[in-house]
Amino acid sequence: MTAIADLFRQPGPKLVPFLTAGYPHKSSTVELVLAAEAGGAAMVELGMPFSDPLADGPVIQRSSQAAIANGVNLPWIFSAVRELRARTAIPIVLMGYINPILKMGPNRFLQEAAEAGVNGLIIPDLPPEEDRKFYDDAKEAGLSAIHMVTPVSAPERITYLGQQAGDLLYAVSHLGVTGTGPDGETALVRYLQKIRQATATPFMVGFGIKTTSDIARLAPHADGLVVGSALLERISAAPDPAAEAERYIRSLVAAMGAGIHE
Amino acid sequence: MSSKNNAPYRYPDERGRFGPYGGKYVPESLLPALAELELAYSAARDDVTFMAELEALSRDYAGRPTPLYHAGNLSRATGAAVYLKREDLAHTGAHKINNALGQALLARRMGKGRIIAETGAGQHGVATASVAAKLGLECVVYMGEEDMARQRLNVFRMELLGAAVKPVSSGTRTLKDATSEAIRDWVATVETTHYLIGSVVGPHPYPMLVRDFQAVIGQEARRQFQDQVGGLPDMLLACVGGGSNAIGLFTPFMDDDLRMTGVEAAGLGLETDQHAATLTAGSPGVLHGSSSYLLQTVDGQVSLPHSISAGLDYPGVGPEHSLLKDLGRVTYLSVTDAQALDAFKWLTELEGIIPALESAHALAALQGGLLNLSPGESVIVCLSGRGDKDVQAVADLRGEPKL
Ligand SMILES: Cc1ncc(COP(=O)(O)O)c(C=O)c1O
């Protein structure tokens, strides 16, 4: 069983912070992941920066540009994950766009990611049918392929994506890019219930989750909650990014517990 | 060169692939809209009422057919028989109107009342804003801040036409970023909005659909050449940004025995990194929803292109051109900013036609003798647009005071 399948078999929602790798500085990433874990994060998403991130809003666009300017590339990200693996077993998911992966060579990418200790992949611009072999090879290498479902995904599509993914799905909270929404609460809860009915595959929800009250509202309806832009905004302004990340994540984890036990 | 002995050229396949290129590399949220568009298009294509309306508007609104003009002075200067396909005479000043009309009618058919578009030179934005005004559709055009500065006239035209022009300040602030921003808008508004993409790029079915709407260029040119001269020309020539005017000219001749040449923007020179010659100097990758040649770094980040012509200043290119290059069916060359400026002057002075800087790239290949044309051979050049929009930029380069 993969680490991600194992984690999401445990009851209760999990907090999953998103961090752009190498942002604000290359030296921040290892510290930030460890701080997130100390704050109660169950898994971490590391963004592989791309020059043209189509599914991302302004905050992640800016952090990606800064990371690229810092010299971040895939080999560097693998080295950061290797460094982390000496210090923590927290599941790590890489999220990023397909072009840098193709440029490196998909086989080399999958092999080096697995060897470094990466546990899963989210590639927003690679729907499963666009490159079945890539996702088959990823699973073969022991990596969980995490597909996205959206409010316009039909129930059959959600069932299909759940089967393809196997371990975990990522429910985009609303139509839009990262850092915006979610909009109407009842519509959102109905959408999360629709996913639950269409698939037995666990799912985390993300895009635009910011506040402890967002967390408390959504926690009962999902297996995981992803917080990205709001976290990046906080650490970009903080004198001590790791301390700020830990504090913020701890408050979100507390809100998650409160939401569940209400 | 000819594909006579092979199976006829038929692309894309049912997965939207042109050989290894094309596809739908998009966020999951866009897949239903792409499927809807594909269905709507295939129904519209078989609907005589739809096609009749498109034809009537192409004729009476857009001014088609555009002339095929035997350019006597260019012919004497080059020794070839030069024919210009006069897309510069189409309504709004470029071939872009052909695609804008077709897609706007499709949008209306799908019940989508809002249209978004990206624009570089502003030509596609102006064409889109015009048809949106005509059909009563809301219109938002994304344009890089850098391009807004170089193409102010077109920004004002779009605003006059009732479009909201949204400045894009991310990345390089040019066409690439305007396209990304239009896609981000579409992800959020996909249920009510049609994305009217301006070239043969983007996810399937766009490269097919835009090609089909632009194929009117080649269909007319073929007929006109047969009427005026008889037979077929020896060569077709067009500039390539995303590649829509080129593919529009080439498509109806794909199974014929003739040479086709596409001309890219070499900017300050291929030996610098300041160019937009994607097919000549790029490598396969994925940008804006499809696989195609791409200008990129060793890490797979998209490179900043450069061209004097905003309409060619794009680091990608259509997937079908990528296949045509690999097949050797089309030859792709590139010419520099300086060569394009010379050709701009050349056509203006010899024929009394001011070309768009984009189209001037195609003419530069002819002027520079890069085409291996034998004396007396005939060539159809796609004069994709007129140069009114570029007059200010050319004046600036010559150090003239603001016009
Ligand atoms: C006059 C003109 N020609 C050519 C182009 C390049 O586009 P394409 O390669 O799709 O024809 C543009 C784009 O703005 C244009 O305005």
Image (tube, coloured by chain):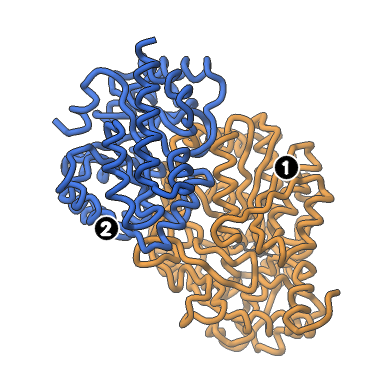
Chain colours: A blue, B orange
> Which residue is at the front of the view, B56 or B270?
B270
Height in image: B58 above or below B52? below
x and y percentages locating residue A222 in the rendered image: 36, 21
- Tell me, yes or no, if residue A170 can be seen here: yes
> Which residue is at the front of the view, B313 or A242?
A242
> Which residue is at the front of the view, B213 or B170?
B170
Position of the C terminus of chain B, as image quadrant, is bottom right
* Left or right: B73, with A81 as reference point: right
Position of the N terminus of chain B, as image quadrant, is bottom left
Snapshot quadrant of residue A95: top left
Height in image: B162 above or below B188? below
Q: Can you identify the residue that label 2 sits on?
A: A105
* Left or right: B203, with B223 as reference point: left
Q: Can you identify the residue that label 1 sits on?
A: B139
Q: Residues within 10 Å of mark 2 (few under 14, many from 20)?
A: few
> Which residue is at the front of the view, A137 or A93?
A93
Residue type (three-letter) at the residue carrying disc 1: Cys
Which structural element holds mark 2? loop
Residue type (three-letter) at the residue carrying disc 2: Gly
User: What separation in Å lies between label 1 and label 2 (alpha carbons)?
Assistant: 40 Å
The chain ID associated with circle 1 is: B
* Left or right: B272, with B151 as reference point: left
Which structural element holds mark 1? strand
x and y percentages locating residue B342 in the rendered image: 68, 85
- Tell me, yes or no, if residue A132 can be seen here: no
Residue that appears at 46% across and 42% down:
A234
Snapshot quadrant of residue B51: top right
Ligand 1 shows up in the quarter that is bottom right
Residue that appears at 21% across and 48% down:
A84
The chain ID associated with circle 2 is: A
x and y percentages locating residue A32 in the rendered image: 32, 45
